[in-house]
Image (cartoon, rainbow, N blue to C red):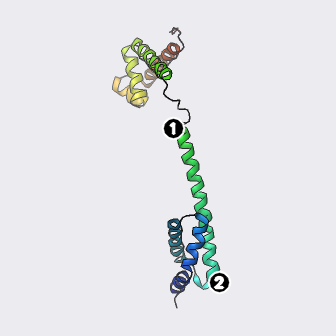
Amino acid sequence: MSEGRNASEAFRENESGLIRFIAARVGCRATAEDLGQEIYVRLERVSWAQVVNPRAFLFRIAANLITNHKEQARRHAELNEEAMELLWGSFDSATPERHALAEEELTQVWSAMEELPERTRQVLAWSRFEGLSNTQIAVRLGISSQAVDKHLRKAIDHLLCASRGEKNPR
């Protein structure tokens, strides 16, 4: 018989036991069947002539796949937790007081932006709201990148001072 045929036969003879073994450890029959298919795919890459105990070999592959599956599930859960923390961790409930404070802060920012010279306000908007690079802004306005930097520094300084209730010394 060919190596592939022996591998297929060994898999079919042990498939139901493998699936039960995997399902008991991962807690899901569908996942166990998926991992069973992965075992079958991996058998195509094995030199079957070197396998002394086919059943033990199949269960060793299954145990390794279970370990990999659990590690991937753990990492996936950690990533989900981090994403949820980033999205909702600092989220305060939208109390009327919080809403009023946010509206007040927004009004202060808009007022401070209106105090900026038109070109500086435009540079800030293109940079922060539209995501344009300094080079792109410089090309649009026909000025140097250093001039764009100066406008941005002026705008940010002004907004920081306004947020603290200070007058900008510039």
Place of residue 122 in the rendered image (x, y in percent of width and height, measured from the top left):
37, 21
Q: Going by the picture, which residue comes out furthest to the front?
A: 96
Place of residue 3 in the rendered image (x, y in percent of width and height, measured from the top left):
54, 85
Element at badge 2?
loop
The residue to which callout 1 is attached is 87
The residue to which callout 2 is attached is 53
Place of residue 109 in the rendered image (x, y in percent of width and height, measured from the top left):
45, 17
Place of residue 58 in the rendered image (x, y in percent of width and height, measured from the top left):
60, 77
In primary-sequence order, the first of circles 1 and 2 is 2
The amino acid type, in three-letter code, at marker 1 is Leu
Determine the residue positioned at 59% across, 53% down. 75
The amino acid type, in three-letter code, at marker 2 is Asn
Determine the residue positioned at 40% across, 22% down. 123
Q: Against 87, is 6 above or below? A: below
Give the distance between the C-alpha atoms of the residues marked 1 and 2, in whole angstroms.
Answer: 51 Å
Q: Against 89, is 79 above or below? A: below
Determine the residue positioned at 61% across, 66% down. 25
